Image (cartoon, rainbow, N blue to C red):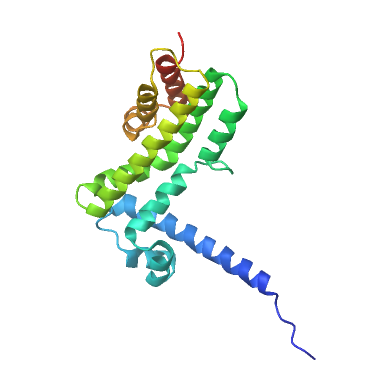
Amino acid sequence: MADVKTPRGYDSRARRATAAKNREKVLGVAERHFRAHGYASTTVAAIAADASVSPELIYKSFGSKGGIVRALYDRGLAGTGPVPAYQRSDEMRERETDPADILEQWGRLTAEVAATVTPVRLLLRAAAAMDPDMAALLERTEGERLERMRHHAEFLAEQGYLRTDVSVAIATDVLWACSSVELYELLVLHRRWAPHQFAAFITDLMRAGLLPR
């Protein structure tokens, strides 16, 4: 009787599923280690041992310890929904026609993403003082955030939503400030604001700073 062989497609899907599972496990363990011990004191070997994978697998998947932080940052930017927050944001703004509603939904998305990405931003900020690679990553991610906010500001300007005395540059800065780690850190982490309070505040701040009075 001839041997029954498992289809290659099935093997490929199983390998991808295993790789994705291991990747999430590594990220979860790494995040706990970074929070408990800091970036400098956390080693790839310790993460690998706790995640029950080899250090070689981590280096193959992420390239370096800094690569793990970048992966955590990217995961945080996706927010908590089944669809990444940035994708939901772009789809929403193409669908909505009321600028006040657009800013309200951006306020909610900002609060959602801040909850998942702020711990990584704080890790980056602390590590950047001692590690050149982390300093470079912090600068790069902040640049990406600024560019994203400029993209939003240009959209508002193109649609004629901005107040006449608000330029694209000013709108970019308002949106950039509203999505900053410092604002979330002060109000939510230190002053214990609820997420919905922070979202409402961000919405009011953007409306007051950008839209006609």
Query: In which quadrant is the N terminus drawn?
Result: bottom right
At 43% from the left edge and 37% from the top edge, which residue is drawn?
115
Give the left or right position of residue 210, taking residue 3 as reference: left
Query: In which quadrant is the C terminus drawn?
Result: top left
- Image x and y of residue 139, in percent: 29, 44
Give the left or right position of residue 190, taking residue 12 as reference: left
User: Would residue 148 be seen by someone viewing this image from the given angle?
Assistant: yes
- Image x and y of residue 175, in percent: 40, 27
Residue 82, located in which quarter of the rendered image? Answer: top right
- Image x and y of residue 158, in percent: 50, 23
Residue 56, located in which quarter of the rendered image? Answer: bottom left
- Image x and y of residue 26, in percent: 43, 60
Residue occupying the far right of the picture:
1
Q: Please name whichever residue, 135 or 195, is drawn nearer the observer in this view of the structure.
A: 135
Residue occupying the far left of the picture:
130
Instruction: Using the image, determine if residue 4 lies above or below residue 178.
Output: below
Instruction: Using the image, determine if residue 143 lies above or below residue 190.
Output: below
Q: Please name whichever residue, 162 or 55, is drawn nearer the observer in this view of the structure.
A: 162
Instruction: Using the image, determine if residue 145 lies above or below residue 178.
Output: below
Residue 172, located in which quarter of the rendered image? Answer: top left
At 41% from the left edge and 19% from the top edge, which residue is drawn?
205
At 53% from the left edge and 21% from the top edge, which residue is drawn?
159
